[in-house]
Amino acid sequence: MRIEELVIDGFKSYPVRTRITGWDSSFNAITGLNGSGKSNILDAICFVLGITNMSAMRAQNQTDLIYKRGTAGVTKASVTVVFNNSERDKSPVGYENLPQITVTRQVALPNVSKYLLNGHKATQNQIQNVFQSVQLNINNPNFVIMQGKITKVLNMKPPEILSLVEEAAGTRMFEDRKEKAKKAMDKKQRKVDELIATLEEEVTPKINKRRKQRDEFLEFQKAASELEKLGQMLTAYEWHQASGKVAAKESDIKAKKATIKEKQADIEKTRAEMKVIEKEIKEVEKRKEAEMKKGGKLAKLRAEQEKLAAAVKELKAQADLKAKDIKNEMGQVNGLESDVAEQQRLLDAKTQEIGKLTASSEQLQQIHATMDEKLQSNEALLQTLLTGVTDTKKNSSGGYIGALQSAQKREADGMAEEKQARNHLSMAENDLKDARKRLAAVQNQVSQNQTQLDVLRKEVQDLQSQLDKTEWTAEKESQLENIVRESRDTIRALSLKRQQLQVQLGRADFQYQPPQNFDTTKVKGTAARLMRLDPTNHDKATALEIAAGAKLFHVVVDDDDTGSRILKECQLKQRVTLIPLNKINARVINDNTLAKCRQFANGKQFAPATSLVQTDAKVQKALPYVFGETIICEDAQAANKITYGAQVRSVTVQGDVYDTGGTLSGGSAPSSSGTLVKIQGLINIDEQLNAAQTAADRAELELKKNERKRSQWRTLGQEMEMKAHELSVLEQQLDGSSASRVQKEVETHEGRIEQARMQLDTAQQKQKEAKVEIKKLEKDMEEFKDNKEGKIEELRVRINKERSQLQKHQVQVSTKKKEVQTASLEKEQIERELDDTSNNISKTKKNIKALEKDAKKLDEE
């Protein structure tokens, strides 16, 4: 495998694509003058073969390999080597059937590098493996023999000579791979050691712990089985004892049956008396119906009259509300129409501003292009003077001749642009003259319309300032009215819902008629109404109701004196039981009992009934009285063990009761099931009612407090709506009038004239600069013969100055472009706002039509 062709493009001193062919198969030498690029050819070969040491190619980084570090327009360096692969026994592995092998390496700004192998993208390792397979290691320090290297080889010590021989023979790269393989094996061995340590320190102890837990669980199962057998024996003993009690009770039942027969005789006697009383009641009802018929028709008519009056009142309120909504919508339409006119005016002004900014930006870009062209011409001139090589892309002739031709071309372009600008200016001035003549004919109409427009605008501004001074807004008015309306609707809905719940909770409400000088705050209410049940405990509501029993509906009072007055003076309609807080003395579950419960629960959930509900601190004393020492358990098994183990009464979540006396009760839920949950709903409704009432009261108070401001605001708002509507109508008329169209034509032509004058100034300035440049170049051509170095230095100073000016001017161009972009975005925003406002006007007008239709329907009703 040998080099057949070398292609260099953009690498070091080779800016353009250069092909080097005709390589000898045995020996090649590169000759030439100093600085002609001989070493760069060798660097290019090392570069494409994948050398990693940049200093070997006399470079610090990849950017140094690109022609003039990428500052001359060349941003990429590429080197391609075509190898003759005709000798198959010396070909790389896998490439024996290819007559040629092409390897390309490219670097580009910023810091981009890639390899191509036979036109396909490849990695650096793939390229190195291909070359190493034919004993070619580019990173071998002895790959390139530099000046003085032979002397160093002659002075080498035996170990160094051995290393050199290994590198030359190609065995060194296998030693490197061997070292890498050893390092990888060491790394894997460390990982294996870590896994073994983890297994011994963490996994094995956990396995031993799980084995121990398994043994303990097996022992627990054995104990549980024995406990179950003992429980069965206990149940059999209890059944035998209960059988004896049943026999004793049967004798008591016989005695009770005799007593029942006596009571049944009394019942029959009472039934006969009830039949007589029912007959008398029917006669009284007949007389009552006769009396009702005499005045029943009048009462029915009065009820219908009251119903119709209420309906009329409701319809009138709805009609007033619709009329108010129509008025508000009309005000919004007038305001939106005024906004449309103002937005249209802003849009026109912004369009003119964009036109001016665009013209100014184009002028700056033309100046920038001229400055850039001049700079490139001077740079090309400097390159030609220094190297004697002409860049055909920039100057046709090169040197001062090319620069002079470029300047003359700029002068000719400036003359053509001046002529074109003068033609545009002449046409625009003629159009402006005609438009001004037509404007003069309607000048009086324009003046009158403008005066009228200014007067209306001033009146609208004055009314707006007066409205601002009232310190009241439509948003505040609407917000407060919405709060009152929504709060009232909420209160009605919640009140209805509360009444329905109260009907379901008849026993939970304590009804009484307090006498005079009676402190009602001492009557707290039924125990059920005083309790708060957390939502997480709603599943235990049935158990709590069964645990409390009838005590759930006992009435809590402050003291026994209050209870005595209630029983004597409050005319109660049903029997009640009172709980005076100063007299009750209930037992509370102590810590020892709770500890026993935990012992017998075996990890199952339980809790004292008093801990599942909350109440105010003032009536906290009533809870132990209501629930006693009852425990709420998760299931029957836990309840059974806690009841007979800790000797406390237990109730399961399902409602089954386990008593220490040995009795059990359960089955279907009681009729009062769900009382506590419903009471919690009633409490939540009361809280929502209070919040809604508070919000309505605050909003009504705010409206009443600012009634004077509201009245003044409504009056001024009506006046402003009328003036704004007049202003909108007038602006629409003026926009559609002939005077307005002529005025806009005048403004358009004036803008054209201003733009043409700017183009004219730019073209004249371009000619002036080109003429100055031509004179200077002619002078420099004369002086260059006698002072070559001085002219080159002067040209360098001029290029640096022009480059600095070009950079500053680039900032101005960028700034102007940003201004144009900002103005365009603002114009788009105004157009979107204008579209939104127009859509809002259409929607509001549709709403007005719908409201007018509803109002008409209400008037008919």
Image (cartoon, rainbow, N blue to C red):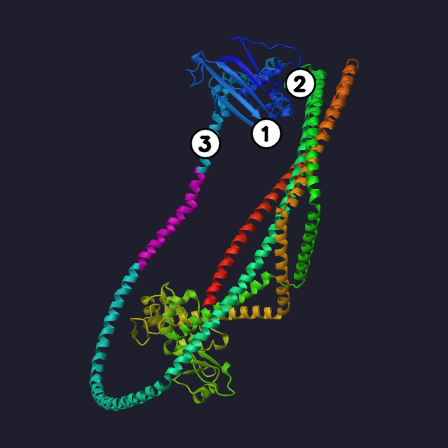
Q: Which residue is mark 2?
A: 395
The image position of residue 260, as x and y in percent, is 22, 87
Q: Amino acid at mark 3?
A: Met
Q: Are marks 2 and 1 in contact (CB under 8 Å)?
A: no
Q: Is residue 257 above or below residue 782?
A: below
SS class, disc 2:
loop
- Range covered by the magenta-colored residues: 192-220
Side of 253 relative to 651 (left or right): left
Q: Main secondary structure of the magenta part?
A: helix
SS class, disc 3:
helix
Disc ID at residue 185? 3
Give the CA distance from mark 3 to mark 2.
64 Å
Give the CA distance from mark 2 to mark 1.
29 Å
Asked if the magenta segment contains residue 479, the reply would be no
Q: Is residue 533 above or below residue 252?
A: above
SS class, disc 1:
loop
Asked if the magenta segment contains residue 195, the reply would be yes
Q: Residue at (46%, 15%) from the top-left corner?
A: 100
Q: Which residue is mark 1?
A: 110
Residue 813 is at least partly visible in this image: yes
Q: Quadrant of residue 767 in the image?
A: top right
Q: Residues within 10 Å of mark 3 (few under 14, many from 20)?
A: few
